[in-house]
Image: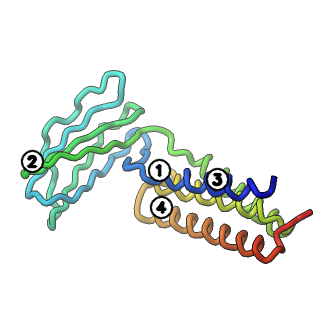
Amino acid sequence: MKKYILPILSLILFVSLAYTASASLGRFNPGDCVPIITAVNGTSVNITISGPPPNATVLIANDQMQSLGDGQFNYTFCNTTQQGQYNYAYQDNLGNSYGNSFEIGDTGVAIILILAIATILIFLFGWFQHNVYFVYISGILALILGVYVIINGFASVNTVYTQAIGYVSIGFAIIFFVVGAFEQLSGEGDSE
C-alpha cells in the first residue's frame, strides 16, 4: 500500500498545478469595481462586457479602454451588482481579439482560513510524529491554498500583494514536499 501513496500524492499535486492555468481575473465582491488591465501591440483597444447567464446581456459594447502607455490599457468596470461570471472581449486596432472572464460573488475567506489552519496542524502533526505522508498532505493543502489565493485573492482584495501571499504558500508547499522526500529517502519518515 505504501508504494501507491507517493504516486497518488504526486497526481494530486499535478492536478492542483493544472488548476493554476486558469486565465480568469478572479473573484470580486458584488458592488466592487473590477480593473481590467491588458497589454497589446496596438494603439487603441475596444472592450465588450457581457453579464452573467442566463441573460448574458451585453453591458458595455465597444467602449474605448484608457491607454496607460507602453501598450498597456485599463478599463474599470463597476456595474457588478449581479452575481455570476462576467465575460469580456477586447480588440486592438490591429484586428487582434482577446477574451477573459471574472466572477462576482463571495470571496471565500472561510475557505482560506480553513485551508491555512488545516495545513499548519497537519504539518505539525506529521513533523512531530515523523510521518512523511502527513507532511505531503500538508504540502498539498498549502499548494491548494496558494493557488486559490493567487486566482481569487483574499477577502475581496485581488492584487499583486495577495498573489505574493499565494506564491509564498506555494513555496511552503514545495518545502514540505522536499522535507517529506528527504525524510522518506533517509528512512526517517516511517511511522510503523
Looking at marks 4 and 1 on the same chain, the residue that comes earlier in the sequence is marked by: 1
Image point (55%, 52%), residue name? 16
Image point (31%, 31%), residue name? 51
* Mark carried by residue 162: 4
Image point (58%, 54%), residue name? 144
Looking at marks 1 and 2 on the same chain, the residue that comes earlier in the sequence is marked by: 2
Give the residue at mark 2.
Answer: 95
| Tag nearer the camera, 1 or 2 | 2
Give the residue at mark 1.
Answer: 152
Q: Position of residue 147 (x, y in %)?
A: 52, 56
Q: Is residue 24 left or right of residue 1?
A: left
Query: Decide: marks 1, 2 in contact (CB < 8 A)?
Result: no
Q: Amino acid at mark 1?
A: Asn
Q: Is residue 8 left or right of residue 99?
A: right
Q: Amino acid at mark 4?
A: Thr
* Mark carried by residue 90: none
Looking at marks 4 and 2 on the same chain, the residue that comes earlier in the sequence is marked by: 2
Q: CA distance from mark 3 to mark 4?
A: 14 Å
Q: Position of residue 181 (x, y in %)?
A: 71, 70
